[in-house]
Amino acid sequence: MSRIEGGRKKAPRALTLGERQQWLTQLEADEKAVRWDLPDLSRFMLATGVRVGEALAVFWSAVDLDAGVVQVDFNVVRAKGEGLIRKSTKTEYGERTLPLPTWAVAMLRKRWEEAANHDGPVFPDSLGGLRDPSNTLRVFRQTRGSEDFSWVTSHVFRKTAATILDEAGLTARLIADQLGHSRPSMTQDVYMGRKSVGREAADVLERALDAKSDAKSARKVHGGRREDR
């Protein structure tokens, strides 16, 4: 029997600049989304490319606002008999220190000034403890609004951050470091020894919500040459 060839995989879909701005405007206007802290959570995931569980596991002790960096070492999971816990990221590659765009630092600084507890999560639940990723994802689905955003999941922010970095000509290795991957692509298997991501990633993500910076950066892609495609 001849082997049936699989269909061509769909290319990962990312939010365009207009969609990113529309998404945040829509969430800011939704009372439930605001109550669940989804606008700032969306901004943080867009600024870093982290998974939702990783974002919810970030404590203030992992944030250095003066240096403009955040340590990503944990993931929030529900453990049998224990409830919600912070668990070390899936692999050694997942532990990383990420520089932040200035707009993300400004957002976090405002949250720090308004936070009731500086020893807990940056994105806590209503009682100040760990927020359940599953419940957060449910509210994401409920508040994403029109059919235009029916395809958007929390993972789309991860894809969007990677796409912005890729379109700016950053190498696959640097993008993999940003996302906490051991391999830059399915065809590349490179051991990652470094844990701190270069400043270039934050510099590129600076334009994620800025139309003027987005256009300017697109014209300055390594002299028009893209690398490591």
Image (cartoon, rainbow, N blue to C red):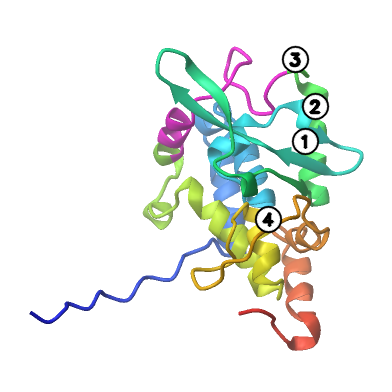
* Residue, disc 4: 178
Marks 1 and 3 close (CB-CB < 8 Å): no
Q: Which residues are magenta?
A: 120-140
Which quadrant of the rendered structure holds the N terminus?
A: bottom left
Residue found at the far left of this picture: 1
* Residue, disc 2: 112
Q: Amino acid at mark 3?
A: Ala
> Which one is in front in this view, the residue at disc 2 or the one at disc 4?
4
Q: Is residue 93 visible?
A: yes
Gap between marks 1 and 3 measured at Cα: 14 Å
What is the chief secondary structure element of the magenta stretch? Answer: loop
Gap between marks 2 and 3 measured at Cα: 8 Å
Against 196, is 59 above or below? above
Marks 1 and 2 close (CB-CB < 8 Å): yes
Residue 138 tag number: none
Give x and y (percent) for residue 138. Answer: 40, 34
* Residue, disc 1: 108
Q: Earlier in the sequence, mark 1 or mark 4?
A: 1
Which is more toward the observer, 208 or 117?
117
Q: Residue at x 79, y 26 (%)?
A: 61
Q: Amino acid at mark 4?
A: Gln
**Circle 2: element type:** helix
Q: Amino acid at mark 2?
A: Trp
Give x and y (percent) for residue 206. Answer: 77, 58
* Residue, disc 3: 116
